[in-house]
Amino acid sequence: MPVRILPSVPEDREEMARIFNHYVEHSFATYTETPVPADRFDAVMSFHDGWPAFTAWTDEGVMAGFGLLRPYSFIPAFEHVAELSCFIRQGMTGMGIGTAILAELESAARQMGVASILATVSSLNDRSILFHRSCGFCESGRLTGVGRKRGVVFDVVLLQKHLQ
């Protein structure tokens, strides 16, 4: 599906939160158990000035998804490492939207000097693991049994992509 990728602006947050909250309520794609109000969304997603965040829009003006990078750590040894979050509107996955968002994020990351992007994914989120692998991420580790949502225990899969 063709989409326009645009930098995220504060006015996008309400719709971004709506997309995110679908996954909060219906999946293990987020670790949050309760919906996040739009006014708390920035804090939950850890947006950071100077770090890229993009939205994808259909020709009809529907936000199809969003993605962002944030610092992995503020310790200087990790200043060239970013952490990824990306969510696609329910019913629009598998159409290349996530790939388009990721391409823009990777381009921005390279310009910033980011050498590696990390993603932490629930072991119960097979589609996300497959997506990341198809985009060049490799499993770099697994934290076994550390997650718990709605009483279900899961692993956190660490995925990594080297950019340079």
Image (spheres, rainbow, N blue to C red):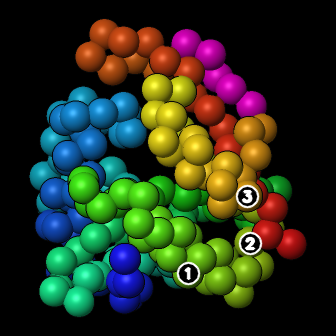
Expressed as whole percent of the image width and height from the top left, the position of residue 31 reads 37, 34
Q: Secondary structure at mark 3?
A: loop
Q: Nearer the viewer, mark 3 or mark 1?
A: 3
Q: Secondary structure at mark 2?
A: loop
State whether residue 47 appears in this view. Answer: no
State whether residue 71 appears in this view. Answer: yes
Residue linked to disc 3? 136
Disc tally is: 3
* C-alpha span from label 3 to label 1: 15 Å
Q: Residues at badges 3 and 2 in contact (C-beta under 8 Å)? A: no
Residue linked to disc 1? 104
Who comes first in sequence, dot 3 or dot 2? Answer: 2
Expressed as whole percent of the image width and height from the top left, the position of residue 3 reads 36, 83
- The secondary structure that dominates the magenta segment is strand
Against 148, residue 109 (above or below) is: below
Expressed as whole percent of the image width and height from the top left, the position of residue 2 reads 38, 84
Q: Which residues are magenta?
A: 141-145
